Image: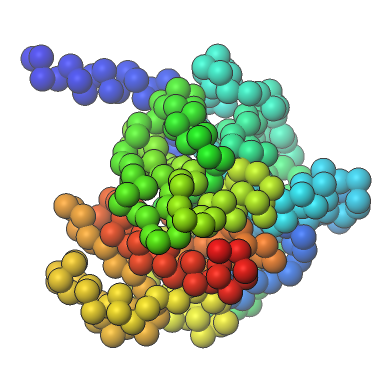
Amino acid sequence: MATTQPTALAEQHKDFMPLDGIDHVELWVGNAAQAAYFFRHAFGFTEIAYSGLETGVRERTSHVLAQGEVRIVLTGALCSGSEVAAHHARHGDGVKVIALRVPDVDHAYREATVRGATGLAAPHELADEHGRVRVADIAAYGETIHRFVDRSAYEGAFLPGYAAVPAAPEADAEAELITGIDHIVGNVELGAMGDWVSYYERIFGMTEMIHFTDEAISTEYSALMSKVVTSGDGRVKFPINEPAEGRRRSQIDEYLEFYEGAGAQHIALSTADIVRTVGQLRARGIRFLQTPDSYYEEVPDRVGEIDEPIEDLKRLGILVDRDDEGYLLQTFSAPLGDRPTIFLEIIERHGARGFGEGNFKALFEAIEREQDKRGNL
Ligand code: FE2
């Protein structure tokens, strides 16, 4: 009977903050109309909801884009006095809200704040003719916030206050490129990683899943420290990076300088067919990090048998890594906006639960080539 105890304790431990997944991610951007076009026409998202002047909102406008289980909200300012304008002036385009679906917002907010989270908006109800949604906000790293959302009593397109956008004629013309959000990575200041890992452990009952030392992922110029926290059922995974000493400025330092603080570094989007997805994205002009051809010479020895032809991976710059449970394929876009800050990852997992540790060195070398071109290495 004693062997059942750890499981029972683990159940009890995570029970205080059950998470049903990432409800949506909201980016505050300089031009939401054009960012929406980019996500629709390059990444295959469909606009499902909108708010702005036409819905009675005077100081900001938001486009809600959906694909698979992903919902991305792109919000821009309608006047200089808007909170969104001030945020954009400081940070450029970036993630403002990582919203988490929970069964009970009041419970989640109470547990989080009792455990030390900074409350930003107490639980409150949003309502319209389609039903009610309960939400509450707490502070995360930098100016990023976590929003608890319970939409179980809502049938509208997104949230009360948003108007549904009728499906565009091209909407279901092709299969999904993207199926879900695999993880969202935060970059925090030097020395702050441990604090943020314990924040997620304490506030959300997450556990540290894996960590990389700077030794494992250092290059000649840069290094980072990375730890991953995950919810009990693995539905929500947040890697946290901090800079580590390198010979020159690391990519995390560059991010922190240009984002002017801590923030979300990348959103990893899952796909069921990365060769097709990245092929289409490249054909539509999306830029990805260049991977040196030499990287692919070592792949057969490093990862063994995989389903995809290495030639396809090489042609598309897709990285491959293996752990005890399988392998994964991944690649990283160029920054989404003007600043060298937020970018996207495309990932396809074949059993592997890691984050591409074996790829990090190859990835960093590729990132540094780009950083060098910008004069920031
Ligand atoms: Fe990632």
118 lies above or below 75: above
Q: Nearer the viewer, residue 60 or 290?
A: 290
In this figure, which colouring scheme has been used for the structure? rainbow
Q: Nearer the viewer, residue 15 or 208?
A: 208
The image shows a total of numbered marks equal to: 0
Q: Look at 86% across and 46% down and name the residue there.
A: 82
Q: Regarding ligand 1, which quadrant of the image does it lie in?
A: bottom left
Asked whether residue 44 is in view, the answer is: no
Percent across and percent down for residue 192 are: 52, 34
**211 on left or right of 62:** left
**252 on left or right of 313:** right
Percent across and percent down for residue 340 are: 62, 62
Q: Look at 18% across and 67% down and name the residue there.
A: 302
Asked whether residue 201 is in view, the answer is: yes
Q: Nearer the viewer, residue 165 or 23?
A: 23
**180 on left or right of 145:** left
Percent across and percent down for residue 12 are: 32, 18
Q: Which residue sits furthest left?
A: 1
Name the image quarter holding residue 271: bottom left
Which part of the image, by quadrant, shows the C terminus? bottom right
Q: Look at 32% across and 58% down and name the residue there.
A: 356
Q: Nearer the viewer, residue 289 or 171?
A: 289
Percent across and percent down for residue 91 are: 72, 51
